[in-house]
Image (spheres, coloured by chain):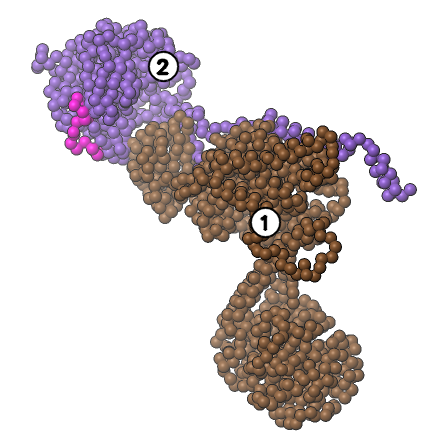
Chain colours: A brown, B purple
Amino acid sequence: MTTLPPAARGASVTALLVSHEGSRWLPAVLGGLSGQTRAPDRVVAVDTGSTDESPRLVREALPRALLLEAPATSAYGAAVRAGLDALPAVDGPDEWVWLLHDDSNPAPDALEQLLAAAESDPSADLLGPKLREWPSLRRLLEVGVTVSGTGRRETGLERGEYDQGQHDRTRDVLAVNTAGMLVRRSVLESLGFDRRLPLFGNDLDLGWRAARAGHRTIVVPDAVVFHVEAAHRGVRPHQIGPAGYQRGERAAAIYTLLVNGSSLALPFMVVRLFLGSIVRVLGLLLVRAPGEAVDELAGLVATYLRPWRVLSGRRARRRASVVPAREVRHLLAPPWMPYRHGLDFLSDIASAVVLQAGDVTAARRARNAAPAETGPVSEESQNLPEDTGLLARLVSNPAAWVFTGLLVAALLAARGLVGTGTLFGGALLPAPGSAMDWWHLHLATRHDTGVGSTSPVAPYVLPLAVVGTVLLGKAWLVVDVLFLLAVPLAAFGAYRFLLRVTTSLPMSLWGAVAYGVLPVVTGAVQEGRLGTVVGTLVLPWLAHAALFLGPEHDQDRRRRAAWRTSLWLALLVAFVPAAWLIALLVAVVALAVGLRGRGTQGLAAAVATPLVATLVLLLPWSVATWTHQGAASWLFEAGLPAPRLAQQLTAWAALTGRPGAGAPGWMALGVLLAAVVALVRPDTRAAVLRAWAVLVVALGLTAVLAAGTFSTANAPTGQPLFLGFPLVLAQAAAITAAALAGTGIRRRLSGSSFGWRQPFGVLVVVLAAVAPVVSTLWWVWSGSDGPLDRGRATTIPTYMTDAAAADPVDGILVVQGSRERGFTYVLTRTPGVRLGDDSVLPSTEDQAALTHFVEDLATAPEPSDVAGLTGLGVAYVYAPRPADIGLVGNLDSVSGLSTGSAGRPGDRAWQVEAAPTGADRPSGSDALRGWLLGLQGIAVVVVAVLAAPTRKVGR
Amino acid sequence: MNAAEKGARRRAASRPRPRLGRSAVAPAALVLLAAVALLITGALGATPQPDDATTASGGVVDHTTFACPDQPAGRRDSVTTDLGLARSPSDVTPPSGGALTAGSVDSTGRSVDLARGSLSRVSSDGGPAVDATGGSAAGLFGFRTDEVTGRTLGVGACPAPRARWWFTGAGAGLDHSSSLLIANLDPGPAVLDVHVLGPDGVVETVATDGITVAPHSVRRIDLADIAPQTDDLAVEVSASRGRVVASVTDSFAAQPSAQPSAQPGQEWLAATDRASRTLRLAGLPATSSSSTLLVANPSDLEATVDVRVAGKRGTFAPTGLSTITVAPGAIETVDLARVLPKKEPVALRLRSRVPVVASVRVTAGSDHAYATPVSPLVGPAAAPVVPGLDTTVQLTAGAVATMAAVVAYDAKGTRVDGTTLSIDATATAAWSPTKGAAYLVVTPSADAGAGTVHGAVSYSGGGLAAVPLTALPFRVERPQVAPALH
């Protein structure tokens, strides 16, 4: 043991340096120790079994220091204990110990300032310096620490805060870091370190116990120590494996809280820490940090599985404490602190997403700007703000003008569809009262519609429910937005996609408008074809996501693109199940082409992932619909089959993409001509051919599907499919081909002379350019002229729907039609069949008994028929106008029915006199559905997490 | 030469080739494929089917219920009630088995044994109400005959319950009085309204709305109680709940001045179910001393009624009869004595801008009968043959000439006479069976292109009566019913 010359009277200071594999920082630390303006009276160095040259460095730098060797397994507390044991006996309260780590370098006046503070504030027993980051030396690490209710170490500092003296106030704190801590030796010896906190959190525990024992801890910002936090950052080779740092920290935090907290709050804390940890684990999983999640969980489990440690720790503290727990509470972090961190966490994620989007934009901008701006850019121009303001940017942006124009056009075209009531008609059913109805429809395992069914609900109900919830539960708003703003929405997606593939603003805008009007020129909007409309909106986003599946992108990007493609494909298939077939064919073609070329590595996985994931994402339906509604339900798009609107698909209609009553077909010819001519241009041919391959796949599938008639179990009359989506896809491919070949076409046409080809090229360009403009004008001019209309969706009297809502057994049998044309009926227990309900209507086989009763009612009703109705849960019979006179006569006369009041003139209503029993309804529910729903929920979350931007994990 | 050089050579060698070389293969193939797909689409595209079916499916009737009018026989009356089970047409195969019961409306009824094709006499007490299921249901009919030999005759069909009944030609005066007999065969109560139209418009009646007829009971309403002192009335019975069998027994003094003490003639007034713009009245006997057309207009608009006569050689506009105007809610009487041809079976066709109901009251001697609206026959129809009287089948064709088979059977179902009547377009033909027949069956031609036929059976010579021919319950057209998606 060596004594350095004392620089101050009274106080005696022993510097206690613990080192472990610290040769990286030790020279600087030893230099700092030697250069102290007030040198410590003694130096004791304890090395815990370093395998590097740490002991040698200490010996060389401090030849007079006492160097002790401790086993490599020693905890920090044990090492300190060993150092203290080597000292002579305590000789008074003014004997201090200055704890130093091998990665903490004190500023030259650190000890002097600490001692000065100790002198001016004699009641302070533990003093801590201000810790700054090493090697940056400018950032603050800690100015005293405390602990929050969730066990988080609270420094009260922002992340990466620079030290500008903003926290320089000597104050009482719960604890100070052991790196640079000046502590009375008597206090340190009496309290000691908890042996169960080998590495982390022992300073917090020490400070907390000190406070309970009546000692004061203050932080002295004038004293500065630079700290690497080697253990915390995991940069030190250590006996705990790298994965152990996090869980060790977490376990220490939980242990510290449980042993030091007040006994009254203990049960609450046990529960809270458990739940909090689970929430954190889920949150970490959501941001794709499974390692951290496991650490979090392991830390919790490690503590909770050994409760006796906590109990014995509490016993020891109870003996030592003299101050009640509530008197140290003011040193703890305020209770709202964890929630603030939760908010910070969420905003971090949001900013990560925004940053990623910003990165993409910046990358695109850079790519576009690259040919124009070559050469170094001056420092000033880089730092200049890019533009003056949002408004100026919008005014100067042609895209903003185009989209504003489309929005105005959409409002003009919707002139006939605004007002009160619900949007429905054609293939579109009215939206339900609230998005909650969709949630209920999606989550229910058994549906009361009709005589009751266990059919899986159509997959599009889930996205509608989600969007409806976002729109404050207003289900009608979802339908309104989709149908009335279909054109601008579709155009926006197409613009984004085309900007990516063509890098030409004019061509992107042209293609965006040509694509945007597809929902209306195909007639999909006018006929209420929900599937085609949503399919048109989703398609560009799917295509955009699929662009990154190619081998030219890095591995992480492709993997995320595969999952993102899965999400978009699942959304598309939810509305247009036949799109899965198209995706399969496109994938096969892509693989076939890719196998011939280079860079096929991972292509198979990239294209197979979305196809398989889609099946899982649409789970209860994708499997169960085979047995309930039949295989053909995989071909019908969202919405009613609406056979009265259907017409035979002619070659002309398929060519021009007019499956319904849309715009005249010739308006599409300009685009089609351009798509064919696009094949001639050699330099863009490779990309154009890809678009053409998609076009051929779409038309081929159209040819196959148009030839057959298909039926589902609840609509057994075979009907041709509405092939809106495949034809939209073919049009989209044609537009993409034309846009690809049209990039830079002006320069090409004017730059070289082709003889007869030049005027021909100009003609094609003019025709193609005019086509979307003509279509847009047609759309605005004709408005929304079609079966789609806005009106009152419910004609069933309210007293009936109220009764049915109160008890589902009080069903309402709605009979329409006439003796000549045949009758149709619906047994409903809601104000009517709503969007999504049609998919869970029971099969005609299941309703055969009801059909028979309705036949009898329309023919020659007997009282037994009415009794049959009660067994199937029918309380009311309702015939909206024009009610068939024969049926009305029958129902008026049959015994067991009494006339009820109907809502409108011409409507007729009857009430079944006997109370409905519903006893004959088929019972049972699909037990598997609950599990499949759970699986779907997990799949959606997992795929969303996997598709999310990679979080930059920063420490 | 290494591989790279080889490749370079190959590329260099291929460059001078014409531009429509390999590079054009893929585009051309794709365009070709697209065109082929379009052509296939156009050639094979499926045509949509209308979701509302137009075909109604036929089924054999397996339950028939009806009731005969429940009125005790008068002192000099002989009342008979016959049930018959007509032979089924070739395209109907009635099921075997089945049960037939007959008895008063308020009882469960006794089982009746009735072989197919035969006629069986049952007790006339309390109706009877008849209920048949299974093999006994299809083709079942019943008639009640009230006869004072040589003087008066009333023949009435036993109708099935329904909700609406129109009787045109009832009366509530001194020389002409009618009673409404309403039977409820169902297990639930029936609630009905009775409306009466008189010569001066709708008759203000008392307590005729919401008449409740208890289950399995009969209610008799004398029209004199609700619309006194009116000779000519049209009566509507409409059930707002349940269904009933309604009959009107009508007694009319054909020669009030000549023989004040003479017993008035009795007749069962046949009903029609609703007012119509076109009415065909059939059952005018060839021999009559007077005939009066009664037209009632239940609508709110004035009716202008155009009358045509379907005679032996076709339909003509009768001379001396202009368009009849009927005020809203009123009943109009028109004397047809000078209008109709003598000694010729005729039928009338009425056309009006608004729906009307009508009948013709015919008198001969001291008895009377009514020619009531009939509908074109959609299947075999049956009528009794009253022994000792002239039974005449009168059939009128629609716009197309047609044929109808008329066969007379005895009570055991043995064919005793028959013919196939050829009827000219819009003309009326008549046929009478020989003696010994108990009932006759009229079967319209089922040939494709055959026209419609409608008609009635009239009885004369010692009493006057007529019953319209209505198709027997063999087949029931079940409309197509399907669950809808919305």
**Mark 2: few, some, or many residues within 10 Å (few <14, many ≥20)?**
many
**What's drawn in magenta, residue-wise?**
B196-213
Q: Is residue A742 left or right of residue A868?
A: right
Q: For marks 1 and 2, give the one nearer the viewer.
A: 1
Residue at the image position 38 percent from the left and 38 percent from the top: A813
Residue at the image position 53 percent from the left and 36 percent from the top: A777
Q: Tell me the tag on residue B67.
A: none
Q: Label 2 is placed on what type of residue? A: Thr
Nearest the viewer among A655 and A671 is A671
Q: Mark 2 — residue?
A: B452
**Mark 1: few, some, or many residues within 10 Å (few <14, many ≥20)?**
few
Q: Mark 1 — residue?
A: A396
Residue at the image position 29 percent from the left and 37 percent from the top: A898
Identify the element where label 1 is drawn.
loop
Q: Label 1 is placed on what type of residue? A: Ser
The quadrant holding residue B99 is top left
Q: Residue B25 location, x and y as percent?
A: 74, 32
Residue at the image position 68 percent from the left and 35 percent from the top: A678
